[in-house]
Amino acid sequence: MTWLSDHASAECCDLTTTGRRTGRHHEIEIWFGVVDDRLCLISGNGPEADWFRNLQADPAVTVRIDDEVRGGRAATVTDPELRRRVGDVMGAKYVWSGDPSIGLTYEAWCYQVPAAVVSVDQPGATAVTG
């Protein structure tokens, strides 16, 4: 097992990105899944979410799960097959029926809104710090 698969059942992770305008580090708590030993994230707030825009501008990120921190490199999911797999994993992990207040259905969250994957570095690699 890898570090990421060992932590796949954790409720959420902390993701640190570098601000695309400010250059400052921003940390959010976010749900995640694991596909092909990559951390998967879904942007329920769409492509305008700050964390999503930040990782598009600078793909170097830091991931903290439980008390462990790793650096990584993020990429937007553009492959339809991978996007489906991300949705399947996230839908299976989180029992969530959508959020009518923002017009987000379960189907849209799982399969339509933007997603990203993070390839997590091996132990000892440099992480984004702030």
Image (spheres, grey):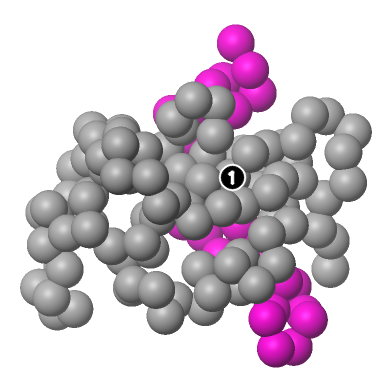
At a point 68% along the width and 49% down the height, the residue shown is: 73
Which residue carries the number 1 mark? 118
The residue sitting at 28% across, 62% down in the picture is 113
Other-residue count near label 1 (Cα within 10 Å), few / some / many at <14 / 14–19 / ≥20 = many
| Rendering quarter of residue 82 | top left
Report the front residue among 105 and 84: 84
* Corner quadrant of residue 98: bottom left
Q: Say which amino acid is labelled 1.
A: Val
Q: Is residue 68 above or below residue 63?
A: above
Of 55 and 81, the residue lying toward us: 81
Residue 64 horizontal/vertical position (percent): 66, 46
Q: Identify the residue at horizontal 70%, vertical 67% (top origin).
A: 58
Q: Residue at x 51, y 46 (%)?
A: 117
Question: In the image, which residues are magenta?
Answer: 1-30
Task: Report the front residue among 35 and 24.
Answer: 35
Do we see residue 94 in this rendering?
Answer: no
Q: Quadrant of the C terminus?
A: bottom right
Image quarter hosting the N terminus: top right
- Residue 42, given in percent of the width and then of the height, sits at 38, 55
Q: Secondary structure at mark 1?
A: strand
